[in-house]
């Protein structure tokens, strides 16, 4: 839009004890597009990190200190320092909804010289619910909070247009002329009082519907339903007595008469009716209400307004310094764990810090992670998108559970990226790590270039954690190679990591030369410059796995704590990982040393949130994580920013993060003797620790912050964007593409064949059809045909299963006798399910009948298709007892129902309950059979038959909860006339 460039603006933020919220607002203001404005922060008396945060911004904003906790007094202090033609007020717990918020809010003042006040709508948090829009207030304190632009508003002269305090603007000269805000009002209705006074002085008010802010009400004592009552009642009564045009006795009488209709009174009465407020609390509320009204009446009657004196000429405008990138990028960053939601692993932590750094440089960022909340506006220009479990397909490669779990999430990520683009959001780059293949869907779609940061590889984790290699993990290792080949650019946090990838053949020499080394960084935490808590404490932070070297630390800790009686050790991080013996490292340590005299000086904290983590760093004298491998080691930087010397190892990229002898001490990985002696030497040398600490802190300041990291990555993004782009959708489904990538990376043919045979049919329609066509081709073994047939049966796709069986009998190479037996079992199952199979399996006469135990074993293992075939043969096994055959028939019918084959399931169950031996089965099995019949009848809307079956179920098992619930629900529907 065209900006009123001739008008300058001053944004005033009054704050107290809300450092977290202020740290969100101030960076948001740097993304505003209005050309000329300054920011004034009025800091009230605070006990949190607000003073330190304000000092950090003092070179970019005007800072004013208020000695009192009074909103109006703070606003007046800000007004006295304001240089802008227009003064704008926004609360510290709000952010602008768009970058053009200020442009829209200032525009009416440029168009009309009689406009002295303006306000915009307020959305509540991240949703689309209006907290305030086009409001007005009467001189009696009656409010309209939300109205559409076309809604009729009261036109009486006693009603006035108004803004909400978190989104309002005034022409500075008229506001100063009326004395600004009345500090007799603590905070409630202060903006209404100003709007009324300006209107009566002849000035106009404009509602600006495009100037939207989002309000995230911060918890304070004032917002407590009861405790805020006295202040609210005082401010309300004071404003009415000041602004109503009537004799004193009329004002007082009408104020008291209207009191019962006040929104804050109605809220408490509703809470009392709902039981959220006790009788005692309600009595306290009524007492505070009366006390507040009396105090307001007294102040209005006996004391003058407490407005500000004219400030004279304004000080010079100090424009807010804002980032001005040559090209403002829109970057999507992928991290399944969201650091804003709590403790997370290193890749997720650095990704969120990178997003903070990119935002600080002026770029738009979208972080995509797993969360039930679909969208959060972390800051203006910084959005967190949540992917819920329901957004993910159920399975893509169910035979490989680890790979499958990662692929279903990656597919949902790709869908969200596409939805963002279709919703009008331009994306320039996707930033992902190779951790858990989160970017594989975006790589396959190919709509936006993917820059991939290499971290510790899956192959490295398998070796360090001593996992047993299988087809699932092997496929993941090959997919790791494949995604590196497909990325638009590769980055690595250290040269040591690139060397490790090269040494383990994950990268070839040619590819390794293209990797850009971009060191990571961290967001400096408030309190990082504070002095250490007195004491001698070792600290370990990390997941409790061997790769982090915790087993080595725990091995040397007993000797160290026995030698140094004034030292203790804090151990934080996920302590739930179990080793080969079934115990966690913590459990093993406690079991071995619980009776030791030094044991009470070891504290296992488990996972901790960020505030607690920062406290642990501040209290530490030495930070020790003797990892067997680190691609970078982000926690080393976290400790170093607090001035904590580090003891680590020479593995991987650690020497590029921790300078041996400068910011810490390094020992060979796994060398427990060296670790013990290095720690002992440092524990008894305070001067040495102090020198390392100062250099560690300086190292982070000079090149280890999130902004340094972001600048390094932006250079990579720009290089990628200068390369020719390739548009278009993938030529095939994502699962097929993943398998093709694995094959293209050089995976063994047998592994590729296994993946193709196990591909799921749960993708989109196009993908499902492509996978079915692939399965109908000449697969390399009968076993893969069997797997595909079972997948179809489990999903009720029996016609396709039948075609697959025919194809297998005609084309499967190297069919063994046991394969023929299994194919024959599938043919019999499909025939039972009503499908014709053109050709019987040779050797069917020799088909062995499965036992019930064998069939149920397959069912417990999740191999439903194979189990159904086995149950059918078990039900026909001539040598089996009748009860066993009937049980097999019951389980087969139940499996058919789960597969969606309801007609066959009901047919089998009817035959079962009509069989003479049915009544000799256990009563719980009989009850379950009748329950399934009732449930299926309800699905057909045959309520009469359903009632009969469910009652038979309850006769046999009165405690059957699901039958009881269904019968009650059916009875309620019948009583309500619903068929």
Image: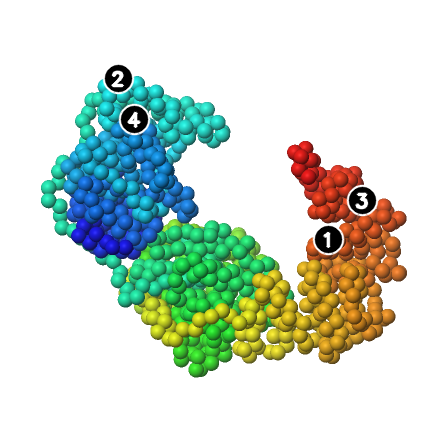
Mark 1 vs mark 2: which is more N-terminal?
Answer: 2
Per the image, the residue denoted by label 2 is: 249
Specify few, some or many for label 3: CA neighbours under 10 Å numbering under 14, 14-19, or 20 or more.
some
Outermost residue on the bottom side: it is 510
Q: Using the numbered discs, state the Cα–Cα distance from disc 4 to disc 1 in whole angstroms.
A: 67 Å
| Front-most of residues 344 and 784 | 784
Residue located 44% across and 52% down the image? 375
For residue 172, above or below residue 353? above
The quadrant of the rendering that contains the C terminus is: top right
Q: Using the numbered discs, state the Cα–Cα distance from disc 1 to disc 2 in whole angstroms.
A: 78 Å
Contact? badges 3 and 1 (CB < 8 Å):
no
Q: Using the numbered discs, state the Cα–Cα distance from disc 3 to disc 4 in whole angstroms.
A: 73 Å
Contact? badges 4 and 2 (CB < 8 Å):
no
Q: Position of residue 651 (x, y in %)?
A: 43, 71
Mark 4 vs mark 1: which is more N-terminal?
Answer: 4
Q: Secondary structure at mark 1?
A: helix
Mark 2 vs mark 3: which is more N-terminal?
Answer: 2
The quadrant of the rendering that contains the N terminus is: bottom left
Q: Position of residue 880 (x, y in %)?
A: 87, 58
Mark 4 vs mark 2: which is more N-terminal?
Answer: 4
Outermost residue on the top side: it is 249
Per the image, the residue denoted by label 1 is: 902
Per the image, the residue denoted by label 4 is: 140
Q: Position of residue 110 (x, y in %)?
A: 20, 48
């Amino acid at each position: 839009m065209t900006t009123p460039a001739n008008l300058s603006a001053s944004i005033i933020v009054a704050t107290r004890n809300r450092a977290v919220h202020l740290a969100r607002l101030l960076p948001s203001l740097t993304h505003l597009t209005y050309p000329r404005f300054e920011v004034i922060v009025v800091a009230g008396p605070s006990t949190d990190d607000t003073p330190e945060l304000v000092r950090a911004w003092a070179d970019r904003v005007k800072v004013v200190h208020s000695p009192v906790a009074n909103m109006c007094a703070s606003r007046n202090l800000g007004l006295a320092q304001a240089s802008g033609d227009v003064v704008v007020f926004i609360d510290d717990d709000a952010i602008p909804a768009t970058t053009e918020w200020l442009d829209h809010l200032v525009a009416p003042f440029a168009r009309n010289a009689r406009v002295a006040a303006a306000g915009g709508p307020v959305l509540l948090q991240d949703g689309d619910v209006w907290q305030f829009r086009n409001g007005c207030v009467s001189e009696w304190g009656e409010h309209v909070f939300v109205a559409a632009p076309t809604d009729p508003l009261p036109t009486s002269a006693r009603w006035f247009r108004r803004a909400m305090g978190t989104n309002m603007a005034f022409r500075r000269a008229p506001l100063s002329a009326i004395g600004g805000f009345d500090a007799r009002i603590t905070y409630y209705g202060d903006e209404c009082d100003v709007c009324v006074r300006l209107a009566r002085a002849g000035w106009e008010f404009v509602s600006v519907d495009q100037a939207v802010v989002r309000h995230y009400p911060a918890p304070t004592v004032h917002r407590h339903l009861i405790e805020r009552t006295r202040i609210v009642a005082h401010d309300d009564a004071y404003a009415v007595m000041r602004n109503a045009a009537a004799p004193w006795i009329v004002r007082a009488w009408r104020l008291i008469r209207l009191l019962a209709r006040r929104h804050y009174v109605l809220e408490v009465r509703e809470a009392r009716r709902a039981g959220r407020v006790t009788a005692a609390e309600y009595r306290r509320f009524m007492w505070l209400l009366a006390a507040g009204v009396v105090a307001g009446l007294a102040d209005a009657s006996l004391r003058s307004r407490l407005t500000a004196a004219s400030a004279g000429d304004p000080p010079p405008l100090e424009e807010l310094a804002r980032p001005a990138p040559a090209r403002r990028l829109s970057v999507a960053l992928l991290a399944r764990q969201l650091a804003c939601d709590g403790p997370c692993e290193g890749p997720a932590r650095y990704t969120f810090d990178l997003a903070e750094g990119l935002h600080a440089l002026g770029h738009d960022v979208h972080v995509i992670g797993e969360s039930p909340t679909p969208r959060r506006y972390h800051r203006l220009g910084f959005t967190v998108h949540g992917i819920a479990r329901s957004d993910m397909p159920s399975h893509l490669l169910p035979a490989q559970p680890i790979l499958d779990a990662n692929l279903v999430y990656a597919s949902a990520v790709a869908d969200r990226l596409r939805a963002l683009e279709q919703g009008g959001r331009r994306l320039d780059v996707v930033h992902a790590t190779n951790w858990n293949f989160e970017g594989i869907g975006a790589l396959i779609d190919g709509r936006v270039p993917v820059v991939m940061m290499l971290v510790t590889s899956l192959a490295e984790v398998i070796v360090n954690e001593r996992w047993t290699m299988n087809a699932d993990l092997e496929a993941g290792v090959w997919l790791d190679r494949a995604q590196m080949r497909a990325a638009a650019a590769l980055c690595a946090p250290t040269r040591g990591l690139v060397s490790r990838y090269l040494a383990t053949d994950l990268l070839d020499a040619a590819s390794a030369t293209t990797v850009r080394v971009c060191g990571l960084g961290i967001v400096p935490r408030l309190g990082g410059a504070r002095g250490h808590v007195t004491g001698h404490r070792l600290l370990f932070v990390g997941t409790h796995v061997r790769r982090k070297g915790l087993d080595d630390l725990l091995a040397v800790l007993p000797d160290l704590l026995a030698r140094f009686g004034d030292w203790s050790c804090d151990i934080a991080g996920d302590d739930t990982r179990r080793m080969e013996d079934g115990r966690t490292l913590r459990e093993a340590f406690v079991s071995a040393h619980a009776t030791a005299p030094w044991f009470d000086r070891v504290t296992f904290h488990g996972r901790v949130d960020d505030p607690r983590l920062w406290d642990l760093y501040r209290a530490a004298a030495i930070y020790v994580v003797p990892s067997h491998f680190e691609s970078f080691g982000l926690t080393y930087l976290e400790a170093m920013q607090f001035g904590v010397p580090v003891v680590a190892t020479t593995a991987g990229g650690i020497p590029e993060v921790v300078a041996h002898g400068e910011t810490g001490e390094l020992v060979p990985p796994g060398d427990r003797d060296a670790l013990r002696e290095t720690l002992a030497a440092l524990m008894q040398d305070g001067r040495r620790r102090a020198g390392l600490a100062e250099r560690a802190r300086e190292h982070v300041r000079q090149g280890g912050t999130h902004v340094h990291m972001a600048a390094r990555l932006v250079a990579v993004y720009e290089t990628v964007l200068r390369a020719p782009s390739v548009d278009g959708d993938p030529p095939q489904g994502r699962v097929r593409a993943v398998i093709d990538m694995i094959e293209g990376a050089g995976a063994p043919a047998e592994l590729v064949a296994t993946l193709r045979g196990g591909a799921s049919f749960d993708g989109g329609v196009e993908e499902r059809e492509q996978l079915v066509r692939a399965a109908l081709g000449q697969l390399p073994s009968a076993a893969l045909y069997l797997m595909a047939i079972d997948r179809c049966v489990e999903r009720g796709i029996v016609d396709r299963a039948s075609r697959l069986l025919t194809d297998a009998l005609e084309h499967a190479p190297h069919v063994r006798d046991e394969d023929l037996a299994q194919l024959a079992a599938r043919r019999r199952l499909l025939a039972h399910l009503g499908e014709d199979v053109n050709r019987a399996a040779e050797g069917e006469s020799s088909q062995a009948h499965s036992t019930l135990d064998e069939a149920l074993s397959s069912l417990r293992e999740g191999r439903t298709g194979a189990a159904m075939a086995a149950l059918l043969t078990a039900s026909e096994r001539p040598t089996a007892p009748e009860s066993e055959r009937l049980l097999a028939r019951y389980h087969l019918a139940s499996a058919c129902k789960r597969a969606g084959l309801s007609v066959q399931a009901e047919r089998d169950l009817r035959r079962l309950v009509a069989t003479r031996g049915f009544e000799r089965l256990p009563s719980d099995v009989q009850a379950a059979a009748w329950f399934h019949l009732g449930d299926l009848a309800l699905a057909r809307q045959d309520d009469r038959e359903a009632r009969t079956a469910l009652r038979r179920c309850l006769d046999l098992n009165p405690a059957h909860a699901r039958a009881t619930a269904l019968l009650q629900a059916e009875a309620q529907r019948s009583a309500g006339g619903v068929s």
